[in-house]
Image (cartoon, rainbow, N blue to C red):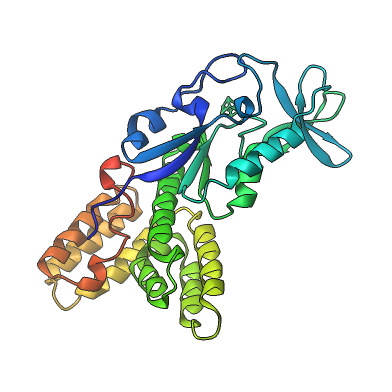
Amino acid sequence: MNNNFNKVDIGISACLLGDNVRFDGGHKNLIFANKVLNQYANYHRICPEVGIGLPVPRPTIRLVEENGQTYLRDSKTGLNDYTETMRQFSLHKCQHMAHLNGFIVTSKSPSCGMERLKVFDVDGHQQHKNGVGIFTQTLMEQHPNLPVEEDGRLNDLPLRENFIERVYTHKDWQENVAGSDEIKDLIDFHSRRKYQIMAHSYQAYKSLGKVVANHSKAPLDELKTEYFSTLMLAMKNIATRKRHCNVMQHIQGYFKKQLSTDDKAELTALIIQYKRGLVPLLAPLTLIKHFLKNYPNNYLEQQTYFNPYPLDMGLNG
Ligand code: SF4
């Protein structure tokens, strides 16, 4: 089982790292980023508003809708329009982000926000809350498979774990499949991620299996593009208790000849207790890992399901 992980490369809004770059001269320190993830990540900080030359402190800016288009303008007068400058800056920065495995952005910012931003009309009345910050919108358009998450959502433990899982999946892909012209590397990737993908979406696991199985019918680059976008979309599904139980029951099947009746009953009981929320996922997983030690199985041992990211991050409930 792989317990060795290289550092991941994470882009991040600079104010989340404690940089005093916000409009009011303050920051928005994200504890998870500064106390936990910093031990596992190389950070690539960016403040788009400072990047386009705005001062600190500065007048606030916001998203304004006019004739069906969204603009980035200063909140008070609406006279200064930063939309094109911000788009060009973001496009330029995005050209140098192919090495990133994920990006953490600041919520509610008209530059960095990922979703549900307030959008106003030219008279200053709020129109809706479906806006996306100009920088992050460009980032997600240019790198559609890159895991992107907001600071606020990372305080939700299932969303935090999901983001980290996607980041490490992205890194595995970049390191082992993206630059390879061997179908074998795609097949290996799919094989060792079988149960992890199933925990997110059984349907996606089936679809991805078909993509890999069709490898003689399409150019490898096309297959890889289809596979990776389907995978990264599927990984956004939260791995629920029900899905985890389904996966663990599949895995239990590998031991049916070796385990005693008592061992089987113990594992079944733990899986049921986990399903009911009485024990954490680690309880049945630890027992499965113990069985794996006693009854080695190469196929199971390579499964990223058991170690999707460094477990000492303490994310796994
Ligand atoms: S939210 Fe983005 S633009 Fe605003 S201060 Fe933070 S990094 Fe800069």
Ligand 1 shows up in which quadrant of the image?
top right
- In the displayed structure, 96 sits above or below 105; it is below
Q: Nearer the viewer, residue 261 or 236?
A: 236
Q: Quadrant of the C terminus?
A: top left
- In the displayed structure, 238 sits above or below 182; it is above
- In the displayed structure, 241 sits above or below 295; it is above
* Quarter of the view holding residue 107: top right
Residue drawn at the location 44% of the way across and 55% of the way down: 170
* Residue 97 horizontal side relative to residue 170, left or right: right
Q: Nearer the viewer, residue 291 or 69?
A: 69
What count of labels does the image hold? Answer: 0
Residue drawn at the location 41% of the way across and 40% of the way down: 157
Residue drawn at the location 84% of the way across and 22% of the way down: 79
**x%, y% of residue 310?**
29, 47
**x%, y% of residue 206?**
48, 74
Residue drawn at the location 13% of the way across and 64% of the way down: 293
* Residue 269 horizontal side relative to residue 88, left or right: left
**x%, y% of residue 240?**
42, 54
**x%, y% of residue 161?**
40, 45
